[in-house]
Image (spheres, rainbow, N blue to C red):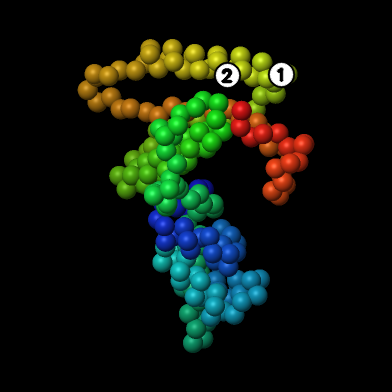
Amino acid sequence: MIDVAVIDDPAAAGVSLDPVRARLLAPLAAPGSATTLSATAGLSRQKVNYHLRALERHGLIELVEERRKGNVTERIMQATAASYVISPAALPAVAPDPARAPDPLSARWLLALAARLVRETGELIRRARTADQRLATFAVDGEIRFASAADRAAFAEEPSASARHLAAKYHDEHTSGGRPHRLVIALHPTITRHSGPTPPSAPDQPSTEE
C-alpha cells in the first residue's frame, strides 16, 4: 500500500466521494472484510459487499486474501493507498488553468497552481510506476512568522529574485537529453483554527486574498 494516491478518473472520484463508501474505505488502511466492516458501519454484510465491489472495481481497494469459512469465502480487502487526492483531471472541463489570469498576489492563482501541481504530479507518478522508474522530485516545506506586511513583501521578493537568478544560471535550452522541470514557490498564511463557513459581514475574518 502506498502513502498517497491521486484519483484522476471521474468515475473513481465519484465512488470515493460517496459518503457510505468513503466511510468504508477509511478503515481499510488495514485489511478487513465485509463481515468486520458491517459491525462498525451499521450495514448488512450484503450491502457492505456491494459497496466494496464498487471500490474494488475502481482500484481504490484490492484483494489481500480469501479465507474459507464453512460454505462462505471471506474476501479480505485493503485500500490501495493510505490516503487519496482527487486530481483536477477528474473534472477536465472545469479544471483551473494558471495561465488564464497569472497574478503572484492572488490566492486563487495560488490555488490554480496547486491544482496543476496535483494533476501533473499524479500523472508523473502514474508514468513512473508504469515504467518502473524512480521519479525525481524536490520540495521544501516550512513556516515563518512575519512582524509586518512590509517584511512579508520584502521576504517574497528575495526568493523570487533568487529563483530568477538560479533559473537563468541553470536553464539550458540546447543540451541533448535535458529535461524541463516545473518550479513553484508558494507563500500563504498558516491556518491556526478551523471553523465552518463565516458570513461575509463577520469583521474578525481576514481576507484570504490580497
| SS type, badge 1 | loop
- Cα distance, mark 1 to mark 2? 13 Å
Looking at the image, residue 178 sits to the left or right of residue 71; the answer is left
Residue at 39% in and 37% down: 135
Query: Residue tagged by mark 1?
Result: 148
Residue furthest to the bottom in view is 71
Foreground pick, 11 / 22: 11
Query: Residue tagged by mark 2?
Result: 156
Image spot of residue 5 (x, y percent): 47, 50
Q: Quadrant of residue 154?
A: top right
Looking at the image, residue 180 sits to the left or right of residue 52; the answer is left
Q: Residues within 10 Å of mark 1 (few under 14, many from 20)?
A: few
Residue furthest to the front in view is 201
Q: Quadrant of residue 131?
A: top left
Foreground pick, 27 / 187: 187
Residues under numbered marks 1 and 2 in contact, where contact means CB atoms less than 8 Å apart: no
Is residue 133 shown to the viewer in this render?
yes
Residue at 53% in and 17% down: 159
Q: Residues within 10 Å of mark 2 (few under 14, many from 20)?
A: some
Residue at 35% in and 42% down: 128
Which of pointers 1 and 2 lies earlier in the amino acid sequence? 1
Residue at 50% in and 17% down: 160
Q: Amino acid at mark 2?
A: Ala
